[in-house]
Image (spheres, rainbow, N blue to C red):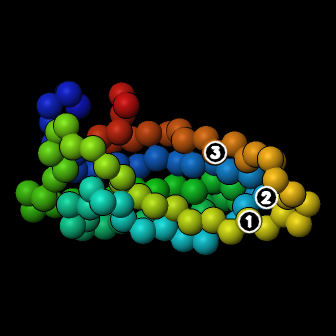
Amino acid sequence: SHESAPFVAFVFELTYCTDMLQFSGCSEGALDPDWYDFDCIEYIPGVIRVGGFAIGGETIPWGRFGSLAFLYFTVICDWCAGGEACNLTFDNFQDDLVGF
């Protein structure tokens, strides 16, 4: 149960507007338990999959608050004058994110 179990693995996807933004990279967030593997990949245009897992007893303790990942974008629309919005959609939660 995620209500009390330590957090050792996660995957999620982020969908964004390719006409306004360009994905430029990612890094581990402040909750990094020294991930054995962590990565972000734009596997189809406009959809980024983010994931990581820890081994060897390293975990994020239950109840901890903070960031899992930082995702970086470049604004690429010349027509963006201010006030335009790009919806960011988080979904496809897997592993220890299921139920959140």
Instruction: Look at 36% across and 52% down and name the residue there.
Output: 67
83 horizontally vs 14: left or right? right
Instruction: Look at 91% across and 60% down and name the residue there.
Output: 79
Residue topped by disc 1: 75
- Asked whether residue 53 is in view, the answer is no
Sequence-wise first label, 2 or 3: 2
Q: Is residue 29 above or below residue 64?
A: below
Q: Amino acid at mark 2?
A: Met
Q: Which mark is residue 20?
A: 2
Locate the C terminus by quadrant.
top left
- Residue 6's x, y, as percent? 16, 42
* Contact check, label 2 and label 1, Cβ < 8 Å: yes
Q: Amino acid at mark 3?
A: Leu
Q: Which mark is residue 88?
A: 3
Instruction: Look at 20% across and 60% down and name the residue there.
Output: 33
The secondary element bearing badge 1 is classed as strand
Q: Is residue 88 above or below residue 51?
A: above
15 horizontally vs 29: left or right? right
Give the crowd class for mark 2: few <14, some 14-19, many >=20 residues within 10 Å. Answer: some
Q: In the rendered image, which quarter is residue 22 located in?
A: bottom right
Locate the N terminus by quadrant.
top left
